[in-house]
Amino acid sequence: MADWPSDALRRECAEPAPLLGETVHVSAKTLEEIATARAGGGLSGEVRTLLRSFVLVPLPECYPRTGLS
């Protein structure tokens, strides 16, 4: 394998690492927290981690809710 001219160029051109695994497991307690969450309310560390890793994406209140009952 050839050497890169610089570390910065190597990082810029390297293939990105996958953000998520094949599956994500979320506990029933966390699903309940998500289903009952309100804008401006507090969130657990697990939910904040899921948001930072884009497993969860915040949507406006008017967005139709599906999949959680």
Image: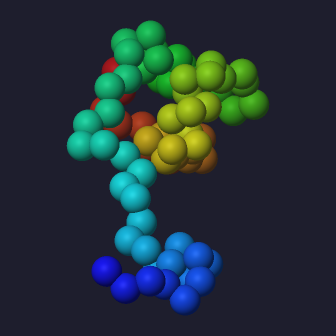
Residue at (42, 66) in percent of width and height? 16
Q: Is residue 32 left or right of residue 1?
A: right
Residue at (55, 89) in percent of width and height? 5
Task: Estimate the x, y position of residue 23 in percent, counting from the top left.
Answer: 26, 37
**Frontmost residue, 19 versus 36:** 19
The relative height of residue 44 versus residue 57 in the rendered view (above or below) is above
Residue at (52, 17) in percent of width and height? 33
Total numbered badges shown on the rendered structure = 0
Q: Quadrant of the N terminus?
A: bottom left
Residue 48 figure quarter? top right
Can I make out residue 12 in this image?
no
Q: Quadrant of the C terminus?
A: top left
Residue at (59, 83) in percent of width and height? 6
**Frontmost residue, 53 versus 34:** 53
Task: Estimate the x, y position of residue 22 in percent, counting from the top left.
Answer: 24, 43
Q: Is residue 43 left or right of residue 27?
A: right
Task: Estimate the x, y position of residue 42 in percent, counting from the top left.
Answer: 72, 22
Q: Is residue 62 left or right of residue 29?
A: right
Can I make out residue 2 in this image?
yes
Q: Is residue 11 left or right of residue 39?
A: left
Identify the image's colour scheme: rainbow, by chain, secondary structure or one colour. Answer: rainbow
The relative height of residue 65 versus residue 45 in the rendered view (above or below) is below
Question: Please, which residue is most extreme toward the bottom here?
Answer: 5
**Frontmost residue, 22 versus 41:** 22
Question: Please, which residue is most extreme toward the left here?
Answer: 22
